Image (cartoon, rainbow, N blue to C red):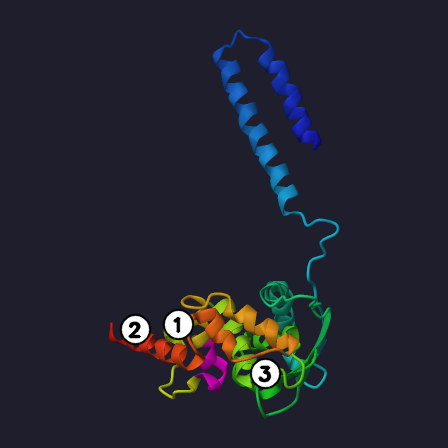
């Protein structure tokens, strides 16, 4: 027990022995009770939040490399801190049976004018020109970090699911974008466009007919057992019908 808490208990006991309570003693009693409760609450709160010794928290070591563009080191460190902060949260959202999250990843900035960023296994590579033109777009590393966590084997399933999940976690979870922000398409298979088009569809599914669909798809993609019928199992309708329901919902939103 904390010395401060012990001191309060001893002092309170001495004070309460005398039943003849003057106004001063009543005030003192209230003071000790109030601070005793605060101390107990603090100690219990610390105990509740402290992780157990046998429950290691997900962590990640970032190997930051800005050697090709040293002027981007401050941006790189900001991105590094963002990954460290959000990595445990995304690991929890994308956990599955027997899954062990990577403990290390690379974050390299290449002196290039092409593309935005890409990820191969546990190595993220970012185009320097994109960062210089869009310095506010630090959220791009969330998308790439998700690819590291996904760890899908080759030919595990459709690429639109891979990119849709990454953009869903970036825009809907990390940035908290509302459904109205996401683009939609009248294409009867518009969900296959991936990225934020699919992400909006996933957001609607998660908050409507198929809660938990992203985690379900992720688990099957990681195990190489994806099948289109997963959408019907989770949402009660075939994938194409769910997409049409989604488009109808979006039209209703715009007409309000």
For residue 81, which quarter of the picture?
A: bottom right
Pointers 2 and 1 in contact (C-beta within 8 Å) = yes
The answer to which of 198 and 19 lies nearer the viewer is: 198
Please identify the quadrant where the C terminus is shown. Answer: bottom left
Of labels 2 and 3, the one closer to you: 3
> Which residue matches tag 3?
157
Which SS class for mark 3? loop
- Magenta segment boundaries in residue numbering: 191-199
Q: Residue at x 58, y 73 (%)?
A: 218
The mark found on residue 253 in the picture is 2
Mark 3 packing: few (<14 Cα in 10 Å), some, or many (20+)? Answer: many
Q: Residue at x 63, y 63 (%)?
A: 88
The Cα–Cα distance between marks 2 and 1, rounded to whole angstroms, is 9 Å
- Queried whether the magenta region covers residue 177, the answer comes back as no
**Residue 234, percent across and down?**
48, 69
Magenta stretch prevailing secondary structure: helix
Which SS class for mark 1? helix
- Queried whether the magenta region covers residue 196, the answer comes back as yes
> Which residue matches tag 1?
179
The answer to which of 243 and 23 lies nearer the viewer is: 243
**Residue 37, percent across and down?**
56, 30
Task: Kindly give the residue lying farthest to the top in the view shown.
Answer: 20
The Cα–Cα distance between marks 1 and 3, rounded to whole angstroms, is 25 Å
**Residue 14, percent across and down?**
63, 14
């Amino acid at each position: 027990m904390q010395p401060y808490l012990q001191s309060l208990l001893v002092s309170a006991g001495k004070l309460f022995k005398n039943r003849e309570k003057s106004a001063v003693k009543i005030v003192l009693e209230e003071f000790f009770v109030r601070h005793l409760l605060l101390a107990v609450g603090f100690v219990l709160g610390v105990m509740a939040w402290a992780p157990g010794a046998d429950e290691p928290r997900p962590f990640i070591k970032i190997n930051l490399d800005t050697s090709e563009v040293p002027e981007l080191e401050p941006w790189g460190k900001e991105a590094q801190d963002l990954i460290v902060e959000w990595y445990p949260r995304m690991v929890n959202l994308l956990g599955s049976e027997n899954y062990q999250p990577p403990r290390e990843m690379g974050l390299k900035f290449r002196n290039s004018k092409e593309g935005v960023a890409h990820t191969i296994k546990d190595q993220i590579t970012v185009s320097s020109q994109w960062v210089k033109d869009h310095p506010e777009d630090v959220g791009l590393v969330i998308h790439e970090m998700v690819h590291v966590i996904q760890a899908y084997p080759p030919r595990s399933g459709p690429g639109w699911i891979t990119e849709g999940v990454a953009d869903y976690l970036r825009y809907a979870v990390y940035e908290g974008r509302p459904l109205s922000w996401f683009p939609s398409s009248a294409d009867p298979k518009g969900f296959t466009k991936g990225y934020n088009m699919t992400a909006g569809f996933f957001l609607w599914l998660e908050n409507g007919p198929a809660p938990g669909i992203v985690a379900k798809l992720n688990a099957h993609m990681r195990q190489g057992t994806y099948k289109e019928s997963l959408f019907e199992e989770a949402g009660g309708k075939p994938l194409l019908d769910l997409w049409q329901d989604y488009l109808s919902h979006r039209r209703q939103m715009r007409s309000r």
